Every structure is written in C-alpha cells, then in structure tokens.
Image (cartoon, helix red, strand yellow):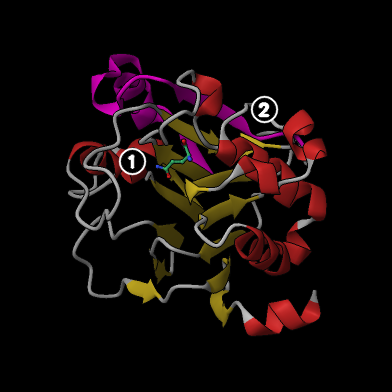
Amino acid sequence: MCRHLAWLGEPRTVASLVLEPPHGLLTQSYAPRRQSHGLMNADGWGVGLHHPEAPPGAPPVRWRSSRPLWGDASFHSVAPVLWAGSVLAAVRSATPGMPADETAAAPFTDGTWLVSHNGRVDRSVLPAAAAVAAESTCDSAVLAAHLLDRGVDDLGTTVTEVAAADPTARLSLLLGDGTRVLAVTWGDPLSYLHTEAGVVVASEPYDDDLRWVDVADRHLVVATRDGVQVTPLGARHRAAS
Ligand code: GLN
C-alpha cells in the first residue's frame, strides 16, 4: 500500500510537507509507522499541486517518478523552493501485476482534480470506459478515472458501489481541486490535522502534534480552509444508490 497526503491552506513549500517533517512521506517511504500491507514504499512517488500563480481553471502540475523518493536528488534540491497552497503527494508500493512506470504513480488527474488511491481493486469490476480514459492500466488510475467520471459529488456512493462489486477491495482515497480536499477511508486509515494555516489529510501523522485526528474506517472527509466534516459511508450510500 502506499502512503499519501493532501494539503490545503497557506502556501508552503513542498519540502515542508514531504521531506522535512520527522515522519513525512520521505520517512514513510522506507519506514512507515502504520502500514498494514507492504514494508516500504519504494516503487515511485508523485507530487501534484495547484500553483498559486496559475490562472483560474489552469490544470494542476505534477512531478512523478518510478524511483524511490529517498534517491531523487533533483526533487530534494527543488522541493524547498516549490510553493503551493494545494498539494497532493504520494509514495508508492506497487500492487503485484501493476505497471512500474511513472504514469502508474499517483496523483492522477482529469485536468482539475488530483487523485491518489491507497489500496487495490479488481479492475474488471470497473467500467470499460474508465479503463479507456485512465492515464495508466494501474488499478488506481482506472479507479480514479471512474470516480471522476461519476463526479465527486457522488464519491461516497461510487466507492460504496465499487466495494460491493469487489468486497476484497481497499479503497482509501485523497482528492483535491485547490478549493477542497475529499478523502475516503475504506480498508486503510487516514488522519487529519486542522490548524489556522490549513488542513492536512494523510495516511499517518507526519509528526507528533497532539491535534492529529484519526478517521475511522468507511468514512468520507470533506475538508476546506474553514473546517473538516467527517461522515460515515455504507448503509446510507447503499440506500441512496
Ligand atoms: N494499487 C496501487 C498501485 O499498484 C496502489 C498500491 C498501494 O496502495 N500500495 O500502485
């Protein structure tokens, strides 16, 4: 499984989110604390951001790689001067059978949303159209295409339907469009930290700040600069679908 995080708030450097925290994604790439599947996340990494100086509606930019995060000297050099108020980043532990190139590394995008998936899903339960639209044959890319095609307003319902079609699926997710962070816990955990500067949602806390809140499994998180809402998924969404 992978480790990921999303930030929404005051512009800050990518290094301050990914490289510098005592237990940030860099550390989680080789020594995750709360990972239940896989020992490390050495199969690539990706960072996407909505740049503060981009014109409204401009697509997010991404920097992805199939190499381990700890070995990427160029990223370590540039990340301290890369600023953004909306960032989504991931380190990858590839699911067996999935492609190894950088296009299989999160975040995925439709030109507006950035999407990261922590888990696995049987691609045969997803619509053929999603496989065509996806950026990669990786299960996470196909899932991202399906979720974005269905629309983020139906995220909880769509996830619940996919889980019903593949009961072994693990479907934890992070999505960001620069104004909101949406997150789902389904099989793998997430925690969030809301401060005056903004909100971060992550697979595991990147430091020992006592304000981190763990999200229970099968919940939907909607985070804006103003606050964080957490609602249960499951029966209600099944009933609505
Ligand atoms: N299934 C995805 C992949 O192969 C995500 C894996 C994960 O969460 N470790 O990359």
The residue beneath circle 1 is: 18
Q: Residues within 10 Å of mark 1 (few under 14, many from 20)?
A: many
Q: Secondary structure at mark 2?
A: loop
* Rendered position, 139 above or below 76: below
Q: Residue 169 has which mark? A: none
In this orientation, does residue 86 appear? no
Residue placed most toward the observer, 60 or 56: 60
Is residue 188 on the magenta stretch?
no
The quarter of the image that holds ligand 1 is top left
Q: Residue at x 42, y 76 (%)?
A: 216
Q: Amino acid at mark 2?
A: Glu
Q: Residue 135 has which mark? A: 2
Residue placed most toward the observer, 57 or 111: 111
Q: Residue at x 41, y 32 (%)?
A: 96
> Which quadrant holds residue 114?
top right
Q: Is residue 26 left or right of residue 98?
A: left
Residue 85 lies, in percent from the top left, at: 53, 48
Q: Residue at x 30, y 49 (%)?
A: 37
Mark 2 vs mark 1: which is more N-terminal?
A: 1
* Rendered position, 9 above or below 15: below
Is residue 62 on the magenta stretch?
yes
Q: Amino acid at mark 1?
A: Val
Q: Are marks 2 and 1 in contact (CB under 8 Å)?
A: no
Residue placed most toward the observer, 137 or 8: 137
Residue placed most toward the observer, 3 or 25: 3
Q: Residues within 10 Å of mark 2 (few under 14, many from 20)?
A: some
Q: Write the start and end of the magenta stretch as one range.
A: 58-85
